[in-house]
Structures are given as C-alpha cells and as structure tokens.
Image (cartoon, rainbow, N blue to C red):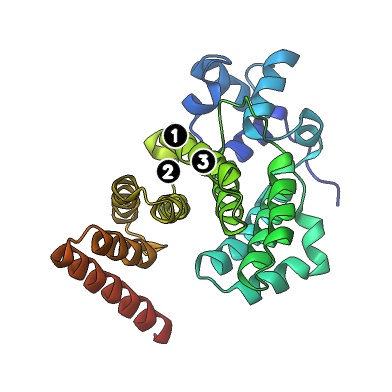
Amino acid sequence: MKKKEESFGQIVRSIRQNRKMTQKMLAQDICSQSVLSRIENNEELPNVWVMYQICQRLGVTLDQVMMLHSEEINQSNQVFAQIESHFVHKRYQALLEKLQDKQIKHYLYLDTDMQMYYYYLGSCAYFIDQDYEGALVSLKKGLSYTYQQDKTNVSVMEIRLLSCMGRVYSDLQQLADARLNLEKSYDSMQALPPERLTTTLTKVYYNYAVFLKEQGELCRSLKIIEEGIALAREKNSFYFLEELFEIKAQVLTFLKEEQAANKSFQLYQAVVDIRQSAKMV
C-alpha cells in the first residue's frame, strides 16, 4: 500500500515535536512564529534558505525531510523510547542486545537517530566492558553527525554526548580535553530554555561535579551538585539523584562539614532504598 504523501511542513512538525521544541524555539532568528505555523499547516511554502535553516536546527538534512513520513518517525520514536528506558534504568546488557539487533538499522532514518545509536553504543562500551577508548570512538562518531565547534543551538543529545566524552577523557587522564567537553556541555545546558531541560541532563551535572571534585575544586563541585539535585527534584526524577547525594556527602566530608555530609548520605541511602523497592514491585 502506497504511503500518503506528506508535506515539508507536516514532517517538520513531527520532528519538532519529537525534539520537544516549541514553534518559538524552532523559529527563532529564522522566521516569525506565525510564519512557521503557516508552514507546518501547509498554508505557506518557505523559500529554500528558510527550509535549510529549519532543517539545520532540527539536526536533519533537507533530503531526509523530503524522504520521510510521520509514520516512520513515530516507529523510530517508539524504538528509541525503549532503548532510552533501558539506558535510564541502567539495564546496559539489555540495551546492548537491542542495539545489536539487526532490525535496529531499519529505524535509523535521520542523522540524529545515528547520533543516538552511537551515544548508546559508546555508553555500553563504557559501562559493560570499561572500554574507554572504544567508548570515546563511538561518542565522537555520534557527535560528528550534527555538531560543529561554533554551533550556537546545541541539542540535548549533543550536550549528553559532550558530557560523556568529558567523563571518558577524565578516566583516561586527558584532563584538558575532559574539562573542555564538560564545561561546554554544562554551559550549553545553562543556555537551554527551561522547557527543554530533561531528566537525563541530571547526569551532566554529576559528570562535571565528579571531575571538579577530583581536581580539588570542591566549592565549585558542590554548586554543580546542588544544581543537579534541584533539576532532579523539579522533574520528580530519581535519575542520577542517588549518585548526586553520594558525591555531595563526599565533598562535604572533604570540606569537614560532617553534619551536612551525614544528612546527604542518609538522603543517598533513602533514594537507593526507594529504587530497590520499585524494582521489587
């Protein structure tokens, strides 16, 4: 059965919604929000330069948009939602099996899909095999699909990739590269509008805080930890919350604030107990 042809505007709307972007965020410095609304509703056909800029901000090529259908995008979203669930719940072996499934290649339509694929692949190399060099190769490849050094609108996935690369560089004792990537990921995250902050970005705070602690920058580390905890609480998420409380207790111990350190350790243990109870249900 032949698929129904879809317009540039319909596909753009599907990808924009998948990226959790508002019309205002996508249209900024490209066209007015009202123009973008008309484009998405097939009331206006944009010129090639506007089409190119819209695609660039969405992290796709014009050719990819013209070949896609919203049905394909939805199928891809469902697959990556399953993969993300494995990742967030730290089921890395199940995640690797999903990535190694031959069918996965059928869902990699966009550059951003390839980017996510290599992000998760690099994470498996890191957490399962402790293969830091292999992890770095995959993370770099993922980032290369959409990222340029002078890019101003950095996506959430690019921020996550930069953060994880910084973590790996730190483990490899390549400290200058570690700081560069961790600071870039943190600064890019700070530039995001509040509505684009996701629970997964809690890990960005954790990675940066660990590095700062290891470099003896304890007060700066504590500030980053507090910001990460605030985001987790705002999003009602336990993702990397226990790790943040644990490292907070460690930093406070180094700062000889024993009472506060004990409180943080108690909160860490409470989150661990809640997560373990949830697994048993």
Residue type at numbered disc 3: Ser
Q: Residue at x 29, y 71 (%)?
A: 268
Q: Is residue 49 above or below residue 94?
A: above
Quote the CA–CA distance across marks 2 and 3. 13 Å
Please state, as top left, top right, bottom left or bottom right, where the C terminus lies in the image. bottom left
Q: Is residue 105 above or below residue 150?
A: below
Q: Label 1, secondary structure: give it.
A: loop
Q: Residue at x 76, y 31 (%)?
A: 61
Q: Position of residue 92 (x, y in %)?
A: 61, 72
Q: Residue at x 21, y 65 (%)?
A: 261
Which residue corresponds to mark 2? 197
Query: Of label 2 and label 3, which has the lower sequence position?
Result: 3
Which residue corresponds to mark 3? 185
In the image, which is nearer the foreground, mark 3 or mark 1? 3
Asked if the residues shown at circle 1 and circle 2 are in contact, with their CB atoms under 8 angstroms apart, the answer is yes
Which residue corresponds to mark 1? 192
